[in-house]
Image (cartoon, coloured by chain):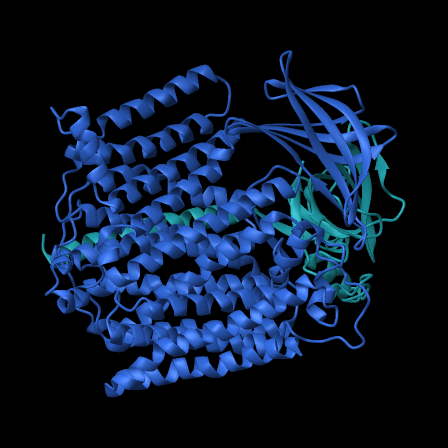
Chain colours: A cyan, B blue
Amino acid sequence: MTRKQRRLTLIGTAGLVLAAALGLVLFAMNDQIMFFHSPQTVAEKNVQPGTRFRLGGLVQAGSVERGPSQSVKFRVEDATGSIPVTYVGLLPDLFREGQGVVTEGVLGPDGVFKASTVLARHDETYMPREVADALKSQGHWQPGAGPQGAAAKPPLATPVSQ
Amino acid sequence: MLIEAGHFALALALGLSVVQLVVPLWGTRTDDSVLIGVAGPAALAVFTCILFSFSVLTFAYATSDFSVLNVVMNSHSTKPFIYKISGVWGNHEGSMLLWVLILALFGAVVALARDALPDRLRANTLAVQGGITVAFLLFLLATSNPFARVDPAPFEGQDLNPVLQDPGLAIHPPLLYIGYVGFSITFAFAMAALIDGRIDAVWARAVRPWTLAAWAFLTLGIAMGSYWAYYELGWGGWWFWDPVENASLMPWIAGTALVHSTVVMEKRDALKVWTILLAILTFSLSLLGTFLVRSGVLTSVHAFAVDPARGVFILGILVVFIGGSLGLFAWRAPLLRQGGLFAPVSREGALVVNNLFLATGCATIFTGTLYPLALEALTGAKISVGAPFFNTVFLPIIVPVLLLVPFGQMMAWKRGDFLGVAQRLAAAIGLSLLAVVGLLAVTRGGPVAAPLGIGLGLFLILGAFQEIVSRAFASGTSLGVGLKRAAGLPRSTWGTVLAHAGAGLTVIGIAASAWSTETIVSMRPGDRQAVGGYTAELLSVTPRTGPNYREDVIRFRIMDGTRDLGELDTMKRLYVTRNMPTTEAGIMTRGVSQIYISAGEEANGTVGIRLFYKPLILLIWLGAVVMAAGGAMSLTDRRFRVGAPAVAKRRRPEPQGQMASVPAPAE
């Protein structure tokens, strides 16, 4: 096999593998990617029931109701409105009323968001960035307003799956 | 005063690393051996200064000196002593100081490895390493001074984030940084080769141990981080495809490719240009990881405080080093002579396929990690790319290359025989298929992924050891002779076998996670719950007070049928200073499987309990340890100890110097 043939084989194989990988990436981008919404953008963009997305905002004060066998209902609110959420499972350590939260799940036809995951905060002053941005754009949150100065703390967020 | 001395030592280190950058480069341009000789002592001096300043910061933490802002922010007088020490790198400034300390450490080790390297190569390498040190010291001094003071000093500190108050913090970051930063030396070697326009087997042999060492440490660091997250976060996951985890996985994958391509370069003098490019890319990915973690562009378990100035600074470093190195590469790479020829089916061919798949896999992770950032910057839409994406994309790329590993390992150099290799692997293939069929039959109706994955892992292990078998136990060899021969095989062969078998163990552990079970229930004392094949009985919930926290201890008894296996405690903690609750999972290990229990909230006498049974889970991390051991084994190979041929020439008159001129065993 000459050097030229060898090079062609190499380039051909590399091209094939890369093309396959690109195909996979495009396929997965279509299928496996989730958008982030706040209650405001859910209303604005008219998100269809059945779509899977991440919903973020504040846990409405006084909205948390615990049901039997670790089920829980609460509302996620922002300046424009709120959306009811149901979740079955253990809530993360720092889930609190009046604080930021990001949940992942599906909006039902009844307008109730069925969460399969609630993202935990692992720091008491941490606000999920998406939530912070959404609230900031609505003029409702000042960076650094946490009890001990949010800027000094490493923010930590980890998904807690159902 | 001591604190200011630490600060001053950092500034001094900056000055000295400028010397380390400029003087040796000048020396190699003008062939001045005195200037070339400056490189080593300069590197040692830089390391001494940074070590001093790191010790000063550690001392400030150990003595809870609350006049230092960094200590106030991240420590507390009641914090256990070990976390006072590990807290030094539990924050942005301190961890950056550890980063440059390790950077300088590698420079110092290269400076001390006198016999292993030709002088010019060492001088150029140290100069490039000095350049990296300059950039990061500037970053540290300009944007992240760990020695900033507070006046007046507060009486008490704000404590360390409770999630970080764990032995994991003492181990994970240092291992990870040695790995991450270790690739800077490989990068510096690549730059040195380009500066000199010369690259040969001597270069490959000189670079390989550094690459191997960095790779082995990175393997351990990632595995340790994964295990830490698994037991600390309380929800039983061990890999989240979090952007920052991806940031450490990308250099690992690129580094794995590099470890393999340097073999080809060393043995066959081929793939030179690619190897240099890979060395540049690997370190660039390490830098990218640093940028992602410290710039605040993403939210993650690891992200540090958000400060735009830092992000811009690191982005600058990133652009200078990646742009500069790729520019130098484009300019000088055409000078590099093409190496030996090989047929597509050969050991070289197999290693090319390895590199192709690993690079592609790395590229897909890169895409998935950065796409959300790019999309948000361009359109403002916020998306999350998580586990489903990476599983869909990464698995189809990595599984084929894993299947090919045993074939590549057995293939001859230059021209191989695929069918012949398949014949020699017949036993391994047969046994693995048998295992798959057997497991499918036993667990009918269960997930198919687990048996298939276990079959793949088994094939990797059996295939790896097949090399030893076929090299030591040719037909008719007695057991004794065979064992002696096996022990006499080169250490690097054993290293390869171990590393590949370790990968097999990890694959088995990952595959078996498809069998893990999870139950969420409300329990009160006296309640029982099945977990895996075992039964957990909740015995009691009792409050307890720790040094800087209060906790509820929830005690379980674990039973196998009627046999008592002992008690297991899981805790719900509240760290008082930060008023922050954490979950401490209770774990019982049975063989390599684990029972894992964590607690949620208490309400009217019941506690929310999450119980997992995780079969074979420990294999994931044990496999990584075995992989790293393989790397370490390769490092002890004779040819790395003997050093480069340049040394052999000088030592030729001595009888034992002859060793060096014996060619490395062909494998």
The residue at the point 34 percent across, 63 percent down is B279
Q: To which quarter of the image does residue B115 belong?
A: bottom left
The answer to whether residue A109 is seen in the rendering is: no
Can you give x and y, in whole percent of width and height, for residue B263 in the image?
24, 54
Which residue occupies the foreground of this view, B520 or B555? B555
Vertically, is B290 above or below B347? below
The answer to whether residue A25 is seen in the rendering is: yes
Vertically, is A31 above or below A149? above
Can you give x and y, in whole percent of width and height, for residue B545 in the image?
80, 42
The residue at the point 41 percent across, 61 percent down is B182
Which residue occupies the foreground of this view, B388 or B327? B327
Q: To which quarter of the image does residue B145 belong?
A: bottom right
The residue at the point 15 percent across, 69 percent down is B650
Q: To which quarter of the image does residue A80 belong?
A: bottom right
Labels in figure, total: 0
Return the residue found at the far front: B654
